[in-house]
Image (cartoon, rainbow, N blue to C red):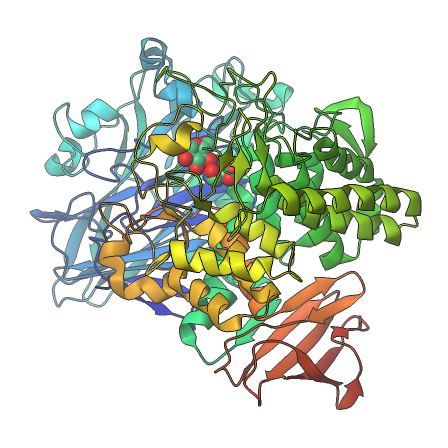
Amino acid sequence: MKFGHFDDKNREYVITNPQTPWPWINYLGNEDFFSLISNTAGGYSFYKDAKFRRLTRYRYNNVPMDSGGRYFYIKDEETTWSPGWKPCKTTLDKYECRHGMNYTSIEGVKNGVSAKVLFFVPLKTWAEVQKLTLKNNSSEVKKLKIFSFTEWCLWNAAADMENFQRNFSTGEVEIEGSVIYHKTEYKERRDHYAYYSVNVPIKGFDTDRETFFGLYNGFDEPQVVAEGNPTNTVAHGWSPIASHCIEVKLQPGESKDFVFVLGYVENAEDEKWESKGIINKTKAKETIARFDTAEKVVAAFDDLKKYWDNLLSIYNVNSGDDKLDRMVNIWNQYQCMITFCFSRSASYFESGIGRGMGFRDSNQDLIGFVHQIPERARERIIDIASTQFQDGGCYHQYQPLTKKGNNDIGGGFNDDPMWLILGTISYLKESGDFTVLDEMVPFDNDVTVARTLFDHLTVSFDHVVNNLGPHGLPLIGRADWNDCLNLNCFSNDPNESFQTTENKSEGTKAESLMIAGLFVIYGRDYIELCKKMGKSDEANRAQKEVDSMIVAVKQYGWDGEWFIRAYDYYGRKIGSEENEEGKIFIESNGWCTMAGIGKEEGLCEKALDSVKERMDTEFGIVLNNPAFTKYYIEYGEISSYPAGYKENAGIFCHNNPWIMIGETEIGRGDQAWEYYRKICPSYLEDISELHKTEPYVYAQMVAGKDSFKPGEAKNSWLTGTASWNFYAISQFILGIQPDYDGLKINPCIPTKWDGFEITRKFRGATYQIKVENPNHVSKGVAKVTIDGNLYKSNVLPLFKEGTTHSIVVELG
Ligand code: BGC
Ligand code: NOJ
């Protein structure tokens, strides 16, 4: 069953039934000011950091689902309704929500009146703009009352949910004209306030929540709206809100626009006040003035559209398959921008207060984003590297507002350092900008111990070398990529965190085959980089380490039919035929096959065959098999999940592309494609009632074959699945790979494909590439022509900036 459809021309998903199986959301803003918005206008806004600078309040896991947001109540005689159906839930004559690239428009029609709201954050603006268009399609004059609504959060979203003995006394607002200002804590330690304005005179306002709703009503029937009269309340403590009331008269056929601005301002210490107790509103007024007419809003919206036209023109495929094209050209790239901005901080599954930016997460997010805006990737790499420790270890997370490592979680995740090599190499290959390697980058944000970014890569490499276990394989530390394989945490206390508890790390023998694979791949990248930089001694040293790792993997990491996953604290195998449960895992088989370890001896092929036989399902590849059915204290969180969910044999979509890429390494394009299609959201649109999450973005996890409901997805949006799947399809299946000195063409496609076309902008030039597959093979480039001339390599050269070239590639 579907709840809408794709509109590819406009790059939108159009939801036509508001009762989606889960709120289907979108993100507004991609720089400093952000909002989450659901298809019924639920959600919230924040400045830079969803924990520390939350502007509007949102209650997660609420009843009913997704209650609270930016709402409009339209009172038309006795009927009150909302354009997004919620919160009033009055049956609408028409409902349509269009989620587009950083904007959402929601239209409701009731009794001859159409109300359409366009929500977006204009470029370089610290505000969400809401353009409400009301149109009278009836033959009578309509006299309407419009009530806007938003609820302020008292800034720190965690404290806002906890510290009520203080919070109920601190709230402060100011009202001037049609603007409601939220200034809680501004008089002491804050240099910022928020505001909510409308560009017309208002009949009145409310800022006291209890008065607006009445103590015993919900969002669906505020008392003030029911009575039809704003009461001009000025909040003192309790829970400040912002609601405007506007009276509108519409002749038959007439339409009117109203512009609301929900914004954020920071003032310097000596510019905070206009007069005693009265905030300085200059900056707010400047922003409001930039959007005080519908025309100005439309112009800003056009700018946003052009911005996305440009971003999405960099990688564009025409394969003849709409479902593939819309994912590659639009939605997957868009999701990569979102994961770049938010890491794992704020979604409808991530509360915005738990995690900030992840060291491993943000580095991986770059591989799907770097081609869009390399300069922002550069800045991010430096921010991330600044949270590394001198021994190469890393803070696992940092806060976007402060850019400082997060002490609550600390470090000790031994895969983390390797991802910095991936992030940096991806940037170098896309941009060709080697100056980044000379940037002086602090350790643990301490500038007195800054070293070059290249040195950070060296200590990353050495962190693995310096932390090897008894088999010469990498010690796992708290965990590798799989946060739930906690091999040094023997926890029997439900109040302990699996992520941070390490009861037994002294004398541990716990080693990770996944980090071994990572080390071989990014170690080779490090070696290649050293050679390019003329550091041949360092390259030789590193080569020896990588070679011994390969030997160790072959000797101690091969189980006979697949790669084992790890050794536990006691040095016993995990992910081996000899285990009762968890005999085989996806991660080590993905990484060791991507690394091509034992390819010549047929190990990769064997391992991938085992993956297919034991872990492939209708909805994707499960993480491990058989699922754990009891708690293994020596394995940790993985065995805490019910079978088939999350890291315990769920289909963890993030790691399916590792297998796809592994398949392309051995040339099996049909298999790689089948895996791609199984988890790709646009192919799942028809089963939305089962899949549940948005058909336009990847979810982190789909319930596996051992679960109660196989095929049901959770945790959409903020997942490494976005970047890894874009990486797999764009670079390994379609096979367009940025390289230091050119663009490498190396597709691995289904044999039945006749070919495809791609436009790729790279280092300032445009490559129009036509791949032909006359012999119906998967892999292998037989012939390349550039502008009609034969070219003897599949690495296309760099071209002069601003030029366009037509390339024909024949597979065979
Ligand atoms: C989840 C992991 C996540 C970890 C860290 C665990 O509960 O299963 O997916 O990475 O928490 O937040
Ligand atoms: C989600 C986390 O964000 C990521 O860092 C981790 O690798 C996966 N879960 C797997 O546990």
- Residue 602 sits above or below residue 795 on the image: above
Instruction: State the image quarter where residue 306 is shown.
Output: bottom right
Q: Is residue 795 left or right of residue 286?
A: right
Q: Is residue 740 left or right of residue 697?
A: right
- Residue 735 sits above or below residue 777 on the image: above
Q: Residue at x 16, y 37 (%)?
A: 225
Say which of 389 and 138 sits in front.
Answer: 389
Q: Is residue 763 left or right of residue 812?
A: right
- Residue 461 sits above or below residue 523 on the image: above
Say which of 389 and 564 sits in front.
Answer: 564
Confirm whether residue 309 shows in the render: no
Q: Residue at x 23, y 51 (%)?
A: 21
Say which of 723 and 50 sits in front.
Answer: 723
Which residue, as the protein is rendered here, is positioned at the far top? 165
Quadrant (top left/top right/bottom left/bottom right) for the C terminus: bottom right
Instruction: State the image quarter where residue 541 is shown.
Output: top right
Confirm whether residue 294 shows in the render: yes
